[in-house]
Amino acid sequence: MKRFASALIFLLSSQAYGLDWQDSREIGQLFEEAGVEGTFVVYDVSAGRLVGHDRVRAHTRFTPASTFKIPNTLIGLSVGAVGNVDEVLPYGGAPQPFKAWEKDMSLRDAISASNAAIYQELARRIGPERMRDHVARIGYGSAEIGATVDDFWLTGPLKISAVEQTQFLAKLAENTLPFSKETQKSVSEIIRLEQRDSLTLYGKTGWENAPGPGTGWWVGWVKKGSHVYPFALNIDIRQASDASKRVELGKASLQALGLF
């Protein structure tokens, strides 16, 4: 099983690197003006093309942090670790980095608040064996979860690149992951951020080592009519004020490409 999973992950990674890449000067200028180091990539599914800034970094793997809440929710629902996205889970009572996390929450509320404690409880309910099998099954990044089931996406060893994020999200957006369509639609629904006319924006932030320096993420997709455009941004967060630049820079990048 491990050999098969490793071969699958290598194949998926190779396919992603083989996609056509188009550099965007406009997005590069946005990063320069924001004063941050990072990457942004959009996967044009219908064209089979990647468009973005800093191709090398876009293919470099980083700890996914709270963006892993997306697959964590999918796995938790599919194995019955939680009945639905509105079932309330306990946070455990321990002090948290943010006071807003110090209360019991449903997955719907926890993914919005990015409550790590709730998702750590979900991971413990899933258990290491089922978690390892499903992370490998969906080919999520390096697919390494290590020996501890409730922090591998926060401190490693799990890592994923921005390009790999877009490949995973493309499948979720089109309900083609190896989970029921109902489960995939439930997860998509709780990360929906905006909807207007024929455009819908889905997204999830992440911040490794929050509230300290680390890698900041914003991943998701734009659906325009029948077209889907998964995207992923990651930046170096050197100070707390950089955190807000994730969504700001991501939206500006989407606007530069005429997608938002």
Image: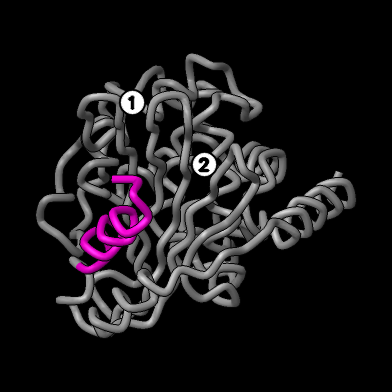
What residue is drawn where x is 61% and y is 52%? 49
What residue is drawn where x is 44% and y is 56%? 232
Q: Can residue 107 be seen in the rendering of this structure?
A: no
- Colouring: one colour
Chief secondary structure of the magenta span? helix
Q: In this image, 85 relative to 143: left or right?
A: left
Q: Nearer the viewer, residue 169 or 259?
A: 259
**Residue 179: percent from left, percent from top:** 60, 23
Decide: is 166 above or below 162.
above
Q: Nearer the viewer, residue 256 or 14?
A: 256
Q: In this image, 40 relative to 7: left or right?
A: left
Among numbered discs 1 and 2, the one appearing first in the sequence: 2
Q: In this image, 247 relative to 120: left or right?
A: left
- In the image, the segment drawn in magenta is 245-260
Q: Can residue 67 be seen in the rendering of this structure?
A: yes
**Residue 70: percent from left, percent from top:** 44, 41
**Residue 16: percent from left, percent from top:** 69, 56
